[in-house]
Image (tube, helix red, strand yellow):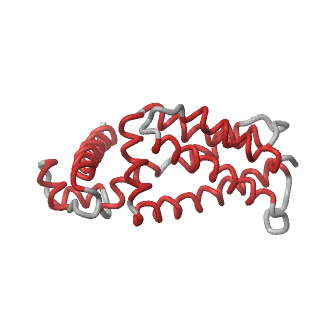
Amino acid sequence: MADRKRQLVADEITEVALQLCAVKGFDATTVDEIVAAAGISRRTFFRYFSSKEDVAIQLLATLGADMRAELAARPAAEAPATALRHAVGVAIDHCVGEPVKSLRVVQLILRTPVLHARMLERQSQWRDVLAAELATRLDRDPAADLFPEMAAGMALNAFEAAMRHWSISDGAADPHELTDRAFTVIAPALQR
């Protein structure tokens, strides 16, 4: 019950912050404005988030672990391109599950340099965990073989390209279809 309440409070703070950022822009929105609009204290805000940037980026927090778990659950004989497409699909499903909120977050991240840098940092972590899982699946030595890291990087670039095009379309494009198109481009390079 406490975890559920904590999540509800974090969601409320996030929603207020996203609304303010949509109106004022990320850089112009202050923590003080967020706490005033959310009706909470600064102390409460910092109990949930370590910074203003974390409000937007926290939505990405579990995606790396979720994608890795999906990759690990894929059939062992499945082609790397197919397995990675399904892994990235977990992140796409998250966006499709909350399209309005996800679109606002993606657009905010892509147009705010500090948030985009944080997302790229997160993607670097995701690449490492996906590469490790792919190396295990393919019985390859990640220290000697470039394929797992390169394949994971290409999959995440496909994901980012799909998200960028979804953002540009203002949510009109289908993120799964965009991801499929991106994977069609990289699939030949993902052959073992």
Name the residue at the front extreme.
169
Q: Residue at x 76, y 42 (%)?
A: 81
Name the residue at the bottom extreme.
143
Q: Nearer the viewer, residue 70 or 183?
A: 183
**As drawn, 30 above or below 188:** below
**As drawn, 140 above or below 172:** below
Q: Residue at x 85, y 57 (%)?
A: 140
**As drawn, 178 above or below 105:** above
Q: Position of residue 95 (x, y in %)?
A: 47, 37
Q: Position of residue 9 (x, y in %)?
A: 25, 44
- Quadrant of the rendered structure where residue 123 is? bottom right
Left or right, 141 with respect to 36, comes to right
Left or right, 152 with respect to 111, comes to right
Q: How many marks?
A: 0
Q: Quadrant of the N terminus?
A: top left
Q: Residue at x 84, y 63 (%)?
A: 145
Name the residue at the right extreme.
192
Q: Residue at x 36, y 39 (%)?
A: 101
Left or right, 58 with respect to 179, comes to left
Q: Position of residue 46 (x, y in %)?
A: 25, 61
Left or right, 147 with respect to 100, comes to right
Q: Position of residue 186 (x, y in %)?
A: 75, 47
